[in-house]
Amino acid sequence: MEVYVQRINDFIYRARKTLLVIIGVILMLIYIRGCINQLTYYEEDIEFLQTAIANLNQRIENGSKMDMPFNSKDIFNAKRELLHLIQEIELRKSEPQHKTIASPAKKARYDFALQNIGGSVVSYHNTELMYSCSLFSILIGKCNKINPPEKAIQKNVEPGEAFCFKGNQGSITIKLSSPIVIDSITFDHVERSNTPNLDISDAPRFISISGMNKKHDEIGHNYGNFTFNVINSNSQTFYFESSSEKYLYIHINVTENYGHQDRTCIYRIQVHGYDSEF
């Protein structure tokens, strides 16, 4: 008799736990639907979010029909997808804060920052790099840089092939292959589908850009503040207001990422322009 009572109690406990999980997911879905209703002019984004929500609803219904509680993996996956949806909604609700226009990069242009054709990293002021220290490297007093700054001016944008620094703030100064009139800059990040757990929280978000003719120019030319909307596209080009001044250096300052507490990663920076006046 005690065995049957124990089984009943276990079943009630599991059923109650499952019910709480389902209620929590439903409440999250209601919140998401409410946010979606406010985004009337983002038709494609709304369609994507509604499809994702429908998929989650279908999973919940399938689990209920089977009369089985969700396991920890199911709960983790549902929570992860919901957090990604909320992150996308909050980003799309916010208005851009910069004066210039950002658009997905489409046609490749000549990159004056590319290391292969003479670009180089000359400074990463107030930026804490990441190091790997083996016992031997400690003994000789020299640790190896992980994801060094030069990664940002190379073509490879595969997972892990990036300039990474600790925290969510850092900077990099790049010497171009020649002085040019800079008209735009392209940021590339690894594709979301090519990351573990679809995590792109280490991508830079808020960025300021300036051109300089000296390595440590304190003034330079401020091109403005930008938002790298990596959720919409992993490659974006920011266009600057017209200028006739040539610059040999470009300084990029990252003031915030997408929420990663430990690091920020810049996969590639491309600098576009022309070296003579039209």
Image (cartoon, rainbow, N blue to C red):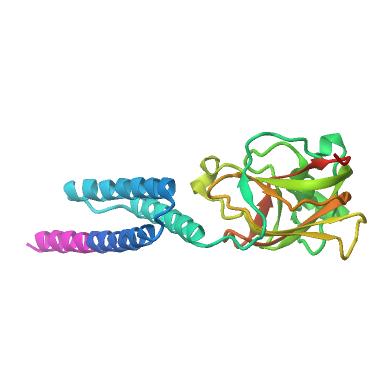
Looking at this view, name the residue that lies furthest to the left.
1
Q: Quadrant of the N terminus?
A: bottom left
- Residue 44 horizontal/vertical position (percent): 42, 45
Residue at the limit of the structure toward the right, as seen here: 214
Tell me residue 8's x, y (percent).
13, 61
Q: Eyeballing the image, is 230 above or below 154? A: below
Magenta segment main secondary structure: helix
Whether residue 83 sits left or right of residue 223 in the image: it is: left
Magenta part of the protein: which range?
1-16
Judge left or right: residue 104 versus residue 151.
Answer: left
The C terminus sits in image quarter: top right
Q: Looking at the image, which residue sits at the far front?
A: 278
Q: Position of residue 189 (x, y in %)?
A: 63, 45
Query: Nearest the camera: 66 or 271?
Result: 271
**Which of these two is toward me, 275 or 5?**
275
- Of 120 and 218, the residue lying toward us: 218
Q: Is residue 230 left or right of residue 45?
A: right
The residue lying at 24 percent from left, 54 percent from top is 69
Residue drawn at point x = 41 percent, y = 57 percent? 39
* Horizontal side of residue 134 vs 95, given as left or right: right
Q: Does the segment drawn in magenta span residue 150?
A: no
Q: Quadrant of residue 11?
A: bottom left
